[in-house]
Image: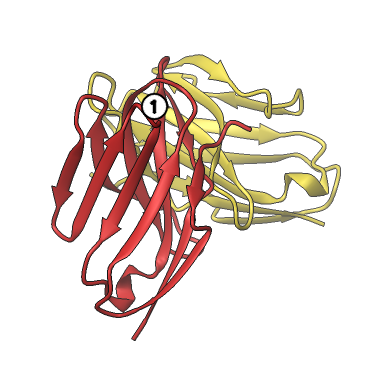
Chain colours: A red, B yellow
Amino acid sequence: SQQGEEDPQALSIQEGENATMNCSYKTSINNLQWYRQNSGRGLVHLILIRSNEREKHSGRLRVTLDTSKKSSSLLITASRAADTASYFCVYMEYGNKLVFGAGTILRVKS
Amino acid sequence: DTGVSQDPRHKITKRGQNVTFRCDPISEHNRLYWYRQTLGQGPEFLTYFQNEAQLEKSRLLSDRFSAERPKGSFSTLEIQRTEQGDSAMYLCASSLSGATGELFFGEGSRLTVL
């Protein structure tokens, strides 16, 4: 498969809780990005972390990258109902091909 | 900047018919990508252009699929002799080369083959 792997496949939490999603990939990468997709819509870029970075923050988002384990995690703190969406990690293989993981479906209950 | 636009948003066709989707990227973006997404799955890479040159094609892109970007601006994706398995959301994205690779997506074109 050309896709990376994400876990969990689905996550259901209460508003205010934190949500953590994990992504694993198979090749060497330039960078890794996370995108959000609301049901039936296009994808929106959330955050990018370069291969020489270990952690990055943006608002309520925190991304980590462990290149030795070929894995990344996305943490959403203080979740809101509006965070309900699918989340995808996307990594750039050398040659500029962007490969998507299978995604995590997040549901935040109010 | 009007973002990436795709047309049509929805297409219902009968098996065996040809369909064509159009993507207008953000005007200054020289890279354009096509992805296909089925329900519950992540987008799968189909093909990628830098300006008018098609630089990479996925093995998923059978002979029935063809994509063009004739003047390095808009792109078309044509599917000939559609099959029910072609039913999916076809997503277009654009980006600026030399940048980080952040993709800007359109809202997609949903194809249903009856």
Which residue, as the protein is rendered here, is positioned at the far front?
Answer: A68
Horizontal side of A92 relative to A64 (left or right) equals right
Horizontal side of B91 relative to B62 (left or right) equals left
Instruction: Give the quarter of the figure containing the C terminus of chain B.
Output: bottom right
**Compared to B16, does B54 lie above or below?**
above
Position in image of residue B19 (x %, y %): 70, 41
Look at 33% across and 34% down and name the residue there.
A32
Position in image of residue A59 (x %, y %): 13, 57
Residue marked by disc 1: A92
Position in image of residue A39 (x %, y %): 48, 65
Which residue, as the protein is rendered here, is positioned at the far bottom?
Answer: A110
Which residue, as the protein is rendered here, is positioned at the far right?
Answer: B16
Q: Quadrant of residue B47?
A: top right
Horizontal side of B36 relative to A49 (left or right) equals right
**Compared to A27, does A65 lie above or below?**
below
Q: Which three-letter amino acid code belongs to the residue tagged 1?
A: Met
Look at 24% across and 78% down and name the residue there.
A16
Position in image of residue A105 (x %, y %): 48, 63
Look at 21% across and 24% down and name the residue there.
A52
Look at 39% across and 27% down and name the residue there.
A92
Using the image as rendered, state which of residue B15 and residue B71 is in the foreground: B15
Horizontal side of B81 relative to B28 (left or right) equals right
Instruction: Give the quarter of the figure containing the N terminus of chain B.
Output: top left
Q: Quadrant of residue A68?
A: top left
**Compared to B7, does B60 lie above or below?**
above
Density class for disc 1 (Cα within 10 Å; few <14, some 14-19, many ≥20) is many
Element under label 1?
A: strand
Q: Would you say residue A65 is visible in this rendering?
A: yes
